[in-house]
């Protein structure tokens, strides 16, 4: 109809879900939208596949209702992960798993999308989900409508808003790797990267040599403990830049950096943007617009 739209970047939602499951060490990964068919589902599937393809993995799509999904998962012999396209579906599937005795997060890690707090918190166990900027979608849609009604005659661009972050809860709180030392190191980094912690702190926590920790990360996760620490910090930083008016010094501290200059260099290296430029482009707090 030639009207501007404001929507969620569903492809980025799928990418974020896949990245989270890969970081936990999963290699046998399933995707379900239940019986739903929509452009949003297709885009989430597309983004999900793109990230897994980069790791030489191919997810398995599951069609049909949650009972059928449960039967397929029940036949698996090894730990698996399941991404559900929305939290309501994930909650129903977790309920079905509980009835037939399938454990979550072990042997099955489950995550959804929307970060519907009611669905996530009443789920047993509490559900990991992806937080989406729905409030900002409404704000931007209203702003564009106002501009149209004002009738300035200028074309109004559409806008696509990316997901904010993965909100980790118990349903994915298990790293699927053969070595418990590596699992504990990953858990420690996820919990403390922004405290801040460094590689020496990780090594002290797991009580093995640095060379062993480095080897385990490269062998099982194809990364280093330093890179995983930086990735966790950048996730915190981008979330704060998008959703708050905190000063750069405050964002740096809450992201694990004592010096703003160190934060700026790390952020530019990770995103090819300065923190200020990123905030200007991606801000999702209506009160800061």
Image (cartoon, helix red, strand yellow):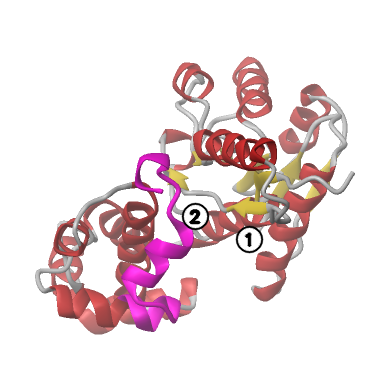
Q: Position of residue 257 (x, y in %)?
A: 16, 68
Does residue 124 lie above or below 106 as drawn? above
Q: Position of residue 253 (x, y in %)?
A: 14, 61
Q: Earlier in the sequence, mark 1 or mark 2?
A: 1
60 to the left or right of 13: right
Does residue 77 lie above or below 52 as drawn? above
Q: What range of the chain is rendered magenta?
A: 267-289
Q: Is residue 276 magenta?
A: yes
Gap between marks 1 and 2 measured at Cα: 9 Å
Q: Residue at x 45, y 27 (%)?
A: 126
Q: Residue at x 18, y 63 (%)?
A: 256
How many marks the image carries: the answer is 2
100 to the left or right of 289: right
Callout 1–callout 2 Cβ contact below 8 Å: yes
Assign a secondary structure to mark 1: loop
Locate the N terminus and report the quarter of the image it occupies. Answer: top right
Does residue 218 lie above or below 151 as drawn? below
Q: Nearer the viewer, residue 37 or 135?
A: 135
Read off the residue under disc 1.
27
Q: Residues within 10 Å of mark 2 (few under 14, many from 20)?
A: many
What secondary structure prevails in the magenta region? helix
Q: Residue at x 64, y 53 (%)?
A: 160
Q: Nearer the viewer, residue 2 or 37?
A: 2
Q: Is residue 170 visible?
A: yes
Q: Is residue 112 magenta?
A: no
Read off the residue under disc 2.
176
């Amino acid at each position: 109809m030639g009207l501007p739209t404001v929507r969620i970047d569903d492809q980025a939602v799928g990418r974020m879900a896949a990245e989270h499951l890969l970081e936990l060490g999963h290699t046998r990964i399933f995707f379900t939208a239940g019986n739903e068919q929509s452009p949003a589902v297709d885009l989430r599937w597309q983004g999900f596949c793109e990230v897994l393809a980069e790791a030489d993995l191919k997810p398995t799509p599951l069609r049909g209702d949650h009972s059928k999904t449960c039967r397929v998962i029940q036949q698996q012999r090894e730990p698996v992960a399941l991404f559900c396209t929305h939290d309501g579906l994930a909650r129903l599937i977790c309920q079905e798993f509980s009835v037939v005795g399938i454990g979550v997060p072990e042997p099955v890690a489950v995550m959804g999308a929307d970060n519907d707090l009611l669905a996530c918190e009443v789920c047993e166990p509490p559900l990991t989900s992806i937080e989406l900027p729905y409030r900002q979608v409404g704000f931007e849609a209203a702003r564009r409508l106002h501009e149209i009604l004002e009738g300035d005659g200028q074309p109004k661009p559409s806008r696509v808003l990316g997901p904010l972050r993965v909100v980790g809860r118990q349903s994915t709180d298990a790293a699927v790797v053969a070595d418990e030392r590596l699992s504990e190191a990953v858990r420690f980094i996820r919990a403390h990267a922004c405290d801040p912690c460094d590689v020496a702190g990780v090594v002290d926590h797991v009580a093995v040599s640095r060379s062993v920790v480095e080897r385990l990360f490269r062998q099982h996760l194809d990364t280093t403990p330093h890179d995983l620490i930086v990735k966790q910090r950048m996730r915190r930083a981008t979330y704060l830049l998008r959703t708050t008016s905190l000063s750069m010094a405050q964002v740096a501290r809450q992201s694990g950096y004592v010096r703003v200059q160190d934060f700026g260099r790390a952020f530019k290296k990770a995103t090819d943007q300065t923190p200020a430029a990123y905030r200007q482009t991606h801000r999702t707090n209506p009160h800061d617009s």
